[in-house]
Image (tube, rainbow, N blue to C red):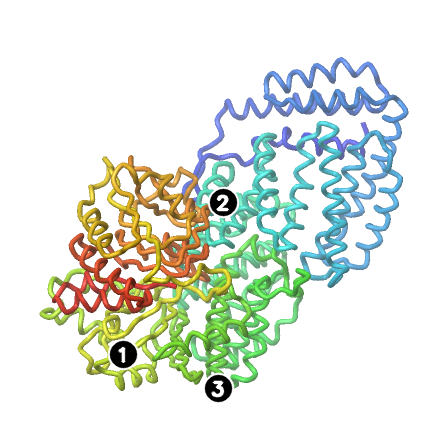
Amino acid sequence: MRRGSQCALALIFSALLHATHASGHGTPLSDPPSTTTAERDGAADLTVAATRFIESLDAYRRGDLSARTALLAAAEELRRRHQRADPAEIAAFYQGLNAAALARGIALEDELDLLREEAAELSTDDLERLPIVRQKLEGFLLRCEGLEDVPVHAHALTLDARLGVRPLEQGRGPEGPAFRAELRALEEKAARSLELFRRAGQVTPTLEPLWILARCALLRADLDTAEDRFMEMDVVAERVHQLAWRERGLLGLIGLARERGSLFIAEDLLDQLATFRAPESCWALAREVAAQKLFVDDGESALSWLARFPPSELDEELAAGAGSERAWEEWRNLVSAAEMRSGRFDRARERMELADAAARGSTGESQGTIADLTRATIHLETNEPEQALALVRALRWEETSAVSRAERLTLEGRALLALGRCDEAILPLEEALAAARSDAEAPPDGHRANGSRHATVTSGSRVGEWLGLSAVETLGRAYVEAGSPLRAAGLFESAHAPIQRRGDCEAAILDLAGKTDLGYVTWMVGADQTLAVHVAPDGRASAASIPIGRRGLERGIERLRDALTATSNSASDPAWRALAVEMGEALLPAELKSRLASRAGSSATLVLAPHGVLERMPLEALLVGHDPRPLGVSTALTVMTALRNGEDLAPPLDGQRAQWMALGAPTTRDHALLPGARREIERIGALHPRWRAVTGDALTRSALEAALRGSSPLHLATHVAAVPRDTGRVSVAPWAFVVSSDELVSAHDVLQLRPRLPLVTLTACGSADGVSIDGLSVRGLAQTMLECGTRAAIVTLWPIQDHAAERASVRLHAALLGGASPAEATRRAREFLWQLGAAPSEWAAYRALE
């Protein structure tokens, strides 16, 4: 049998021949066990059976009709002993072809093998030879029309689509309408090859066209279609034991989950990948676990992991030379990001030299670019911006990813900013942001000049996002130093909001600030410092640099929260007051503090836009100047989770005419009963002329779902519980509302229901809580409702006592019924509890979200 024609046949059963390759049953954090003797014996049996089938099929196709008996026997053995039904379908397909059709198929397959070899010799950036090879393929495809041996035609279509999609992903393809036309043509070829493979009963070869279709969907920014294709890949690859293709499908799904902020889905997918891959022999798994650690801001753990599991020749793909240089680039990017995250630059040089030595050992020469960006980072952190700038500007290579381009440009901008050249710093920082978040402001035709969606959501996607935020922080400082703080505010919000055009965000900020007494404040938290921007009602903007970074803020927030929740009397304990003064002095811009001082003794309105770690800050408890009242008592605070398009939201609440739905106090066995919630609902119902209550046994899952699908404002008083990870309902956040019979309505369920309500009041325990993810706001139950189009939510930062919830809710609803805004009604509830002398844990917990 000729080696060339064997190539296409081997594609059918490459899965069978490598079914147990690199198998393991551990998790990303543990080593997989050794393969058992039984497993090895099973793999050997499968290899023998698959080889027998392939050889007999090749002989039959070449005219040896006597091979038919062996072919059918091999197919039956694969079905009976190895649960593979497709060999029988393949055998039946080829038995249906006459001798002439078989001969023509073999002849064309031999030609295709030569074209495949020519394509394999192309390098990634061989733009001169690529059109020549594709032109030959086009001619070959014309000759395949009408071919009865359709798998040959399908393989040619797949090869052409694979060669065509690569330049589009690298931003080197056509632009505008030509880009869209080329993308459509590639999708048509991949879809047709998929149909032809299925017609011939072939399963394993469908994996590559599915992969190409997923990549095309990413180029169109169609994440749903990409997800469907990656999921189909995963199912098919698992069915045919094709681990390499299953790895690709899972990596695509992991990238998509992170892109959507679905932390828990990403973790589950990593666990699935770890059932058959081990980090020491699979760089893709090691890389994604490290990225996941950065995703949750655990730089120290990421550094330790990367030191233990760098790219290795134990990875068969890297050992074969496929992507080794790219793997080391990814490793360096991850290490660099982890060093910056952890703030540990004392060991950076050591790690840099290790990376350089490893690269030198694998290629035979020093790979300076692997270490240069780390060196530049060290220069910046040791106050040597001139050396850093010279180093990054001396780098002259074609970046292989948007991530490396973003890092280089960010370092250049940081160096220029440190040298006081803020006007020069803006351009590279804007380019860095475009590279790291290349899909955020893509042209309408979907073409991305600086990378692609595919590059964003696959390897190192979390690094790319973090670099994007680093670029945002640095670019914001450049705007401020250049005298444009409003541009900085618009930039901060565009990095966190559905409205991603900075100009639109600036207009929205001005509109919101103009409707308040005190304006709008937003913050951008960096590793070492925080930038605050205040936009006054008249549109004037000012900024302040706060010398506290992410870690320092986390410590301060936890200290203040602990002091507030531990204090039993708001007037007698100075501990929380001292912390509230300290944090208020640090976080609030001078212009805002001046305006607050001028209004001492009266109430005012203010919009605050904290992001990430700051969303856990009890801003309502901050003390400013000589006013003894906390900020949340003196001021009607609206806390923005993200700027949203007004037309996408439910209409504002009409407090005097609204028909309220009230749900609470479900009948449960596993959770404490809530008699206080029932009293709360009854007392509030006595205030409202239009009030419908559902409690006890009637508070079923379907009742809550109906309320969430409706249009009435909703008052919900029930438990919030953790969602088990194995339910498949933790894509958004691991919490759920408890209804009767201890059923759960999770954040994932809420997202599917798309509630679009004028207002929801959630007096459940800690209903403002969620998962804090870089690049996004906190994600939880309340935030999910707002994301779906609910206009406002009144929530609690931590659990509160029933009696406090009852008193606050009655005062809150009385204010709403009188026509107060959600922010003002929440202020009055806080003020009421404050004046009663209630503990800070009671009044400081309430927050109005939009």
Which residue is rendered at x = 11% and y = 65% of the image? 569
x, y percent for residue 512: 43, 74
Quadrant (top left/top right/bottom left/bottom right) for the N terminus = top right
**Disc 3 marks which amino acid?**
Gly
Q: Secondary structure at mark 3?
A: loop
Residue 517 left/right relative to 407: left
Residue 298 is at least partly visible in this image: no
Identify which residue is drawn at 15% across, 60% down: 566
Q: Are marks 2 and 3 in contact (CB under 8 Å)?
A: no
Q: Amino acid at mark 1?
A: Glu
Position in image of residue 558 (x %, y %): 26, 63
- The residue indicated by pointer 1 is 585
Q: Is residue 419 above or below residue 683?
A: below
Q: Which residue is mark 2?
A: 280
User: Dot 1, how many residues are within 10 Å of its Cα: few (below 14), some (14-19), or many (20+)?
Assistant: some
Q: Which of marks 1 and 3 precedes in the sequence?
A: 3
Q: Earlier in the sequence, mark 2 or mark 3?
A: 2
Location of residue 403 in the rendering, given as x and y in whole percent from the top left corner: 56, 62
Looking at the figure, which quarter contains the C terminus? Answer: bottom left
Residue, disc 3: 483
Instruction: Tell me how many marks there are.
Output: 3
Q: In this view of the protein, can residue 317 be seen by the observer?
A: yes
Give the number of the disc on residue 523.
none
Instruction: Say which element carries label 1.
Output: helix
Give the residue at x 50% y 85%.
Answer: 482
Q: Nearer the viewer, mark 2 or mark 1?
A: 1
Q: CA distance from mark 3 to mark 1?
A: 23 Å
Q: On screen, 801 above or below 60?
A: below
The three-letter code of the residue at mark 2 reads: Glu
Looking at the picture, does residue 80 appear above or below residue 246? above
